[in-house]
Every structure is written in structure tokens, then in C-alpha cells.
Image (tube, helix red, strand yellow):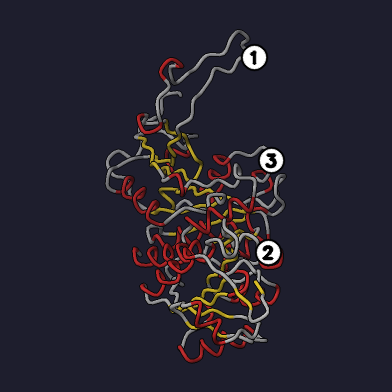
Amino acid sequence: MAAVERVGVGKPSGHLAALVLARGGSKGIPQKNIKKLAGKPLIGWVLRAAGDSGVFDSVWVSTDSDDIEKVAKDYGAQVHRRSAQVSKDTTSSLETIQEFLKYHPEVDIVGNIQATSPCLHPEDLMRVVDMIRIDGFDSVFSVVRHHLFRWKDVKTTGGLTAPENFNTACRPRRQDWHGELYENGSFYFATTELIKQGYLQGGKMAYYEMKPEHSVDIDIDIDWPIAEQRVKRFGYFGKNNPKVIKLLVCNLDGCLTDGRVYVNQDRELISYNLRDFDGIKMLLERNVEVRLISERNLSSSLLSSLNLPCKIEVNVSNKQQAVERWMAKMGSSWDQISYMGCQYSDVECLKMAGTSGVPADACVSAKMTDSFVCKYGGGYGAILEFAEHIVSLLENLGSQ
């Protein structure tokens, strides 16, 4: 890299703007930047993180799309309508940022945040801004640590391949190897003076290492359902509408059980997994009420034999009405309800609940809702898995 003139000597100060570049066209995934990911527009995840960090003087989206402009404004961002000259497939991020700065000379530092990094958390942005404001760095970019063995590429050079970062005679174990740092593209912060010189990285330069679980790039994670699961587990859910969960309602048939009924001449029998029993207790210990619900008219003797530490309501023809009746008694709303279901009759409740989950073997319609999809099937630990997810949300709220 050529020598870069030193800018921002000391501690860069002045107007700090978050800038998300979101062009309307996308060859890979149509309207990718506003496509729903875990129930929210992709760009919404980073805009919420930027806004909740409280470190930016302004938050902007640079776009050429009316649809993206509307979504950006819905999330509280200002919009810069970029020109056609910087809206081409071949346009670089640097060129687009430079155009933005021509129209906004008040900006002294730009935090270029990638729309395709939905697991970004406000705490990361706050620490980076401290590196700039307090430590005096001119540019800071995000990296993630990988433990990957690299080999020489011989497609163009010919010859035999060879290891580039390890010794084949002594392959390091992961726990014994520090790994290597790779850019993950989540963000690039730089002073305006540096950007005007044609650099996003330069001057007094530093990297910021993100947690691997927060390093999700939709440009790479092309399997959208996998990216959704990552976001549901590790994403930032916001501070303005926190996940205060008062009640878990769970379909007994197909979630607590595997859906099978054992019948003899006298009575029917069902079974459940003791791991799910532990999941229910885990929530009760955290003051989350748990109620099981069933459309079937189960006998009182069968219910008592289950010996579960929660209430069970049977012969329910309308699950939504039953949940809303409980909500009214508790003085709560749908966003404070978590719901786990697997059948077509659960779909509306799954859509309305603030937090929803389905076992791995749920019906297609249930899986198509904005729900946490468990790795385990009904009767095989799905409730425990969903309970752990709820606990992680509660802990995330506590840390905020």
C-alpha cells in the first residue's frame, strides 16, 4: 500500500455519521437489503444497532431505491439519494461514500456499516468509536479470527502445492493455535480526510475483533434459513422493545410429545422427554409462567399422571382466544408472550407472539412463520432447546 498522508493527528473529533450503503439492485437475492430476515428487513438489524448505540451524530442510508428509502426512514435513518453514477454493479464503496461526503460536508468521520451484517451489536460500535474518539485512530475495521489451514494456489503458478501457514509434520490443534485475522466486512470507520485521499483504511490504523457468533455476512451465508438461525440465536433484539417474556404457551401434542398416542383397552398413554421437563422448570425459576395447551379432551387421570409443574388446558378449540384470555388476566400483551407450536392450528399464535418457536418436525406452515426452528423434534428435547433460547433473550435484556 502506498504511503498515506497522516490525518486526524491526535484524537479525531467532530460529526460522526453512520452510513449504510444499500443499492436497490442485487444479482444474487432480489431486494436483498430489505428482504425479511428473522421477521425484519435485513437492513433493519444494523440500523437498529447503530441507533441504539447512541454514539452517532447522524445515521444515514445511501440508496437509489424508493422501497429501501421507506424502510430506512421506518427505522429512524436519514436517506441520501445516491446518483446513477454510483449505483452501478462496478461502483466501489469508496466512490459511494465520497459522493455522500460531497453533499454532507459537516461529516468529519464516517462509520460505513454493511447492511449484510445482521448480528452487529451496539456494544461493538461503542467500543470502535472509543478507539477513534479516545485512542485517536484514523481508521478502524472489523475482523474475525479463523483457524483455517491455507495452501498455496497452483492454478496459475503451476508446480506442487504447499502449506502456507502451518507445518504438515506438526499440525497444530485448534486450542494450541492462535489462528489468523480476516476482514469480515461488518464495518469500516475512517476520517473524512482519509476518505477524500482515496482510502478507507490508512493513517493510524487498527482492527476490531468481533466475536465469531456475531460475524454473519449474508453475502457469504447464501443459505438464508441458516443465516436466520444465526440471527435468532446471536442477533441484537433492541432496547426500545425488549423481550420481556411473561408466559410460554406450548402445544402439548407434538411439542411436549412426539405426537403419538399409545392405546390399550382401558386408556390411552402418552410420553414426554425429561429434558423438556427440565426446560419448563428452567423458565419457572426465571418467573416465566408456562402453560400447555391441547385440542384433545384428555382425561384428568392422564393429566395428573404427567406430573408436570405447570398448568394444562385441554379441549381448546380456539388457541388464540385461550391465550388472549390468559393475557387479559395477566395484564400482558402479545409481545410479552412466547408460543411454541407445531400444527396448522398454531400458526396464528406463532405469528402474533413476541417470541415463537417450532420443533424440527413441525408442519411447513408453522416453520414458515417468524419462529425459532429447533434442531430437535417434538418429544425429543425441543422444549428444552426453546427454553434455552428464551433464557438467552432474557439474559441479553439483563445485560442491556
Relative to 169, does residue 262 appear above or below in the rendering?
Answer: below
Residue 303's disc is none
Q: Residue 350: horizontal and vertical position, in percent?
A: 61, 73
Give the mark, 2 or 3, whose residue is nearer the N terminus: 3
Between the C-alphas of marks 1 and 3, the distance is 27 Å
Horizontal arrangement in the rendering, residue 268 relative to residue 144 (left or right): right
Residue at image location 71% in from the left, 63% down from the top: 364
Q: Nearer the viewer, mark 1 or mark 2?
A: 2
Q: For mark 1, give the secondary structure.
A: loop
The residue under label 1 is which amino acid type?
Thr
Give the mark, 1 or 3, whose residue is nearer the N terminus: 3
Residue under label 2: 368
The residue under label 2 is which amino acid type?
Met
Residue under label 3: 89
Residue at image location 72% in from the left, 52% down from the top: 30
Judging depth in this view, the residue of 209 and 150 nearest the camera is 150
Horizontal arrangement in the rendering, residue 359 relative to residue 176 (left or right): right
Q: Residue 82: horizontal and vertical position, in percent?
A: 62, 51
Residue 156's disc is 1
Relative to 186, does residue 276 appear above or below in the rendering?
Answer: below
Q: Nearer the viewer, mark 1 or mark 3?
A: 1
Residue at image location 55% in from the left, 87% down from the top: 300
The residue under label 3 is which amino acid type?
Asp
Judging depth in this view, the residue of 111 and 345 nearest the camera is 345
Horizontal arrangement in the rendering, residue 34 relative to residue 134 (left or right): right
Judging depth in this view, the residue of 300 and 211 nearest the camera is 300
Q: Residues within 10 Å of mark 1 (few under 14, many from 20)?
A: few
